[in-house]
Amino acid sequence: MNETLVHFSEARIVQRDQIIFERVDLTLSKGDFVYLIGKTGSGKSSLLKTLYGELPLNSGLGQVAGFDLLGLKEPQIPHLRRKLGIVFQDFQLLNDRNVNENLRFVLKATGWMDTDKMSQRIDQVLHSVGMSEHGHKFPYQMSGGEQQRIAIARALLNDPELIVADEPTGNLDPQTSMEVMNLLRELNKNGRSILMATHDYALLLKHPSRTMKCEDGKIFEVVQRSPQS
């Protein structure tokens, strides 16, 4: 039986006094690749923010990577986030430092101290996303697809139990989107668990996988039809 990484039961999510989800029932297991789809404003980002502790869980059961979200204390949030790798739509790289320095900054912020081990880990994650030769570059010297690969490398630094990707292809052209998607699928094949919010249905058809839909304050699983028809 697969290890459960995410489990919500009758979970209520509220943002600024507005009910986003009245009841969330959702389970993700180790090794899963799950899409989260829905229109803009349907609550995809709110659910992801609840996962990594930016939005508090209002009521119900919510467990992520061994942490209980209901009553999660402020000092626990950094520890929760070290178990998660978060990939944003807009990359969120620091433009005043090169790739190596961007990644080193994250390692230092999450408690790494040994300089040699930091360098070794940076080399490992850059290699895993096909960006070994780009450590000296600054973000503004790279394409959007290259920056997103670096953002994925950053998400891998602390060997997360789950990668949470919020519209990771949203700012990319179709060809580059497919390349980033291929990378995420490859990471999944190698054992990474991934929850990816997207509105790009072309990706779902090309790479079908378990899909959850946000709509009218609910989350439910949708069955994808075979792309052969």
Image: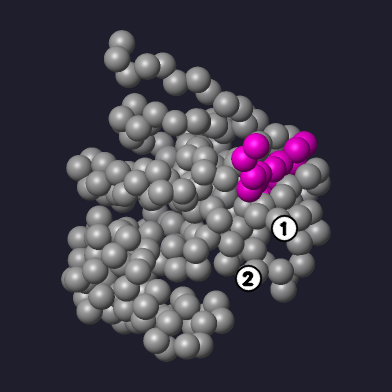
Residue pictured at 50% horizontal, 68% vertical: 158
Work out whether 153 lies above or below 4: below
Residue pictured at 57% horizontal, 50% vertical: 48
Q: Could you tell me residue 41's position as x and y percent?
A: 53, 40
Label 2 packing within 10 angstroms: few (<14), some (14-19), many (20+): some
Res 147 visible? no
Which one is closest to the eye, mark 1 or mark 2? 1
Residue pictured at 44% horizontal, 63% vertical: 156
- Give the numbered dot on residue 205: none
Q: Could you tell me residue 36's position as x and y percent?
A: 51, 37
Label 1 packing within 10 angstroms: few (<14), some (14-19), many (20+): some
Disc 2 is placed on an element classified as helix
**To which quarter of the image does residue 2 belong?**
top right
- Give the numbered dot on residue 67: 1
- Give the numbered dot on residue 78: 2
Disc 1 is placed on an element classified as strand
Residue pictured at 29% horizontal, 15% vertical: 228
84 displayed left or right of 121: right
Work out whether 174 lies above or below 90: above
User: Type of residue at label 2?
Assistant: Pro
User: Type of residue at label 1?
Assistant: Phe
Q: Does the magenta stretch include residue 9?
A: yes
Residue farthest along the top direction in this orientation: 229
Q: In whole angstroms, how far apart are the C-alphas of marks 1 and 2?
A: 11 Å
Q: Does the magenta stretch include residue 103?
A: no
179 displayed left or right of 196: left
The magenta stretch is: 1-17
Q: Could you tell me residue 45's position as x and y percent?
A: 54, 48
